[in-house]
Image (spheres, rainbow, N blue to C red):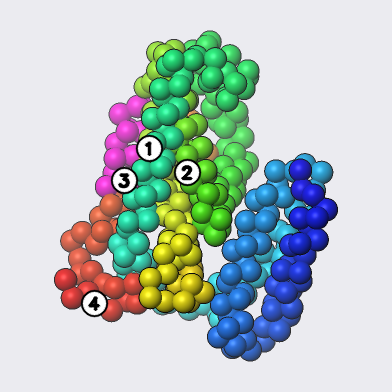
Amino acid sequence: MVSTAWVQKRTPHWDRLERLIGAARGGLGALSHHELQELGLLYRQTASDLAAVNEDASSAQLAAYLNQLLARSHNLIYLGQRPRASGIIRFYRDIYPAAFRETLPATLAALLVFLAGGFIGCIVTLSDPGFAHRLLGPQMTETIERHQMWTHSVVAVKPLAASAITTNNLTVAAIAFASGITVIGTVWTMLFNGLLLGVVGTATARAGMAVALWSFVVPHGALELPAIIIAGGSGFEIARGLLFPGLLPRRESLSRAGVRASRLFLGTIPMLLIAGTIEGFFSPGDAPNAMKFALGAALFGALLAYLFGIGRRTTTADGAPSSR
């Protein structure tokens, strides 16, 4: 539960973010270099605060305020200048894949934590079948025990389901990114999502539903799971800048890591939008399993080719040709 003392402690930071937003109404150019760094740091801290407040159902009014504050600061940070189509194309064509490659160790760290969570979920579910019931809840567990998939509700309301799925995935990715400032937040997000997938996968396999599950997961999961893991990598990149500044002052190290992490996170948004659409309209449908697996394989292959610059000239994160 969110305490009054915690709110009082955090309020000056939210007020400072409000003042910075007000000072930058004419654009980011109105802020000094120090204020720009402060704006980015307060934005990430407030996103982490929102994740904590969302855990308390009685703090809905505070959550609404923080959501509004984050939306204003997000628009200022990412839309401070009128975007040009050529700049957006260049970002996703050149800058983002290069940023991914330069921060690959952070993404691999997120992947390892995610896989560790999946392994733990599998082992615990095999040794204690009741664990799946406690984690997934009685309704989903009973559906699995009846050898039925729980995706019929998605089929019934496809547009609404696609919107809800996309919103949920973007929320998870945003939390994984922003909670990097706390270090443990990103670790927990990756660990829990891996654990959940491991438990569901093991529970459905025990019920003889492995093909049914993975034919549903693979079409959209080929983009959704990498996007969540990359978002976790962006959180780990922030944590790296905070914990291991090297020769730089810690504030400067965190600022630079925040830029790299922000690029990494932004690139996951189109992946999650596409994945949410596929999950809402195609994955739960009656298409042949072979077609679903083929689509997942094609999407994942295309994603790898895009991220690693396969078959084309590579660039640096600044868009310059690579010397490799």
**Dot 4 surroundings within 10 Å: few (below 14), some, or many (20 or more)?**
few
- Indicate whether residue 290 is drawn in magenta: yes
Alpha carbon separation for disc pair 3 and 4: 25 Å
The quadrant in which residue 153 appears is top right
Alpha carbon separation for disc pair 3 and 2: 20 Å
Task: Read off the residue under disc 2.
Answer: 190
Q: Determine the main secondary structure of the stretch shown in magenta.
A: helix
Q: Quadrant of the C terminus?
A: bottom left
Looking at numbered disc 3 in the image, what kind of residue is underneath it?
A: Phe
Frontmost residue, 83 versus 208: 208
Alpha carbon separation for disc pair 2 and 4: 33 Å
Q: Secondary structure at mark 3?
A: helix
Looking at marks 1 and 4 on the same chain, the residue that comes earlier in the sequence is marked by 1
Frontmost residue, 188 versus 141: 188
Looking at marks 3 and 2 on the same chain, the residue that comes earlier in the sequence is marked by 2
Q: State the extent of the magenta-drawn residues as a range.
A: 286-301
Q: Secondary structure at mark 2?
A: helix
Label ID, residue 300 = 3
Task: Read off the residue under disc 4.
Answer: 321
| Residue 155, horizontal then vertical, whole percent | 55, 31
Q: Residue at x 61, y 76 (%)?
A: 38
Looking at marks 2 and 4 on the same chain, the residue that comes earlier in the sequence is marked by 2
Looking at marks 1 and 2 on the same chain, the residue that comes earlier in the sequence is marked by 1
User: As displayed, is residue 297 above or below residue 167?
Assistant: above
| Residue 4, horizontal then vertical, whole percent | 83, 53
